[in-house]
Amino acid sequence: MIKNFMEDVVDHVLPSMLKAFPEVCTCKQCIEDIKAITLNNLKPHYISTEKGSIYSRLQEMEVQFETDVMKAIIDAIAIVSKNPRHN
Ligand SMILES: [Zn+2]
């Protein structure tokens, strides 16, 4: 199975970023918008998840991508905060 590893990194980093920006809305719509904008602004990084012991390598990769992901999340939070699509 092929998956975009960046989705995992975003899921992992997003909760702590949201804590750092307590004023940002965390309704389902806004969170999904933040995730979508973040992933659109990041280069996808596809991995094959069939191989066994890739977990430790994934953690290394996560550290490698974390700064880029954090920057992309900050941009996405700014965009969604300015134009929230929730009702
Ligand atoms: Zn919202």
Image (cartoon, rainbow, N blue to C red):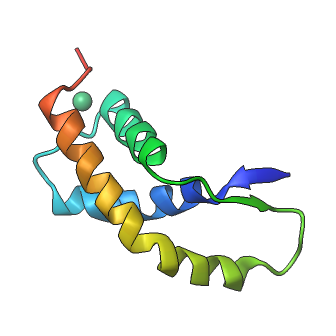
Say which quarter of the image contains residue 83: top left
Residue closest to the far top? 87
Judge from the rendering whether residue 1 lies leftward or rightward of residue 75; answer left or right: right
Say which quarter of the image contains residue 15: bottom left
Badge count = 0
Residue under the image location 66 percent in, 76 percent down: 58
Judge from the rendering whether residue 27 lies leftward or rightward of residue 25; answer left or right: right
Q: In the picture shown, does residue 8 fall above or below 23?
A: below
Which one is nearer the viewer's eye here, 75 or 58? Answer: 75
Q: Position of residue 2 (x, y in %)?
A: 80, 52
Which one is nearer the viewer's eye here, 78 or 21? Answer: 78
Q: In the picture shown, does residue 51 fall above or below 59?
A: above
Judge from the rendering whether residue 73 lies leftward or rightward of residue 2; answer left or right: left
Residue under the image location 37 percent in, 57 percent down: 14
Residue under the image location 42 percent in, 47 percent down: 41
Judge from the rendering whether residue 74 lies leftward or rightward of residue 56; answer left or right: left
Q: In the picture shown, does residue 33 fall above or below 35?
A: above
Residue under the image location 69 percent in, 85 percent down: 56
Task: Identify the image quadrant of the C terminus.
Answer: top left
Image quarter for ligand 1 equals top left
Q: Position of residue 67 (x, y in %)?
A: 37, 72
Q: Position of residue 32 (x, y in %)?
A: 41, 35
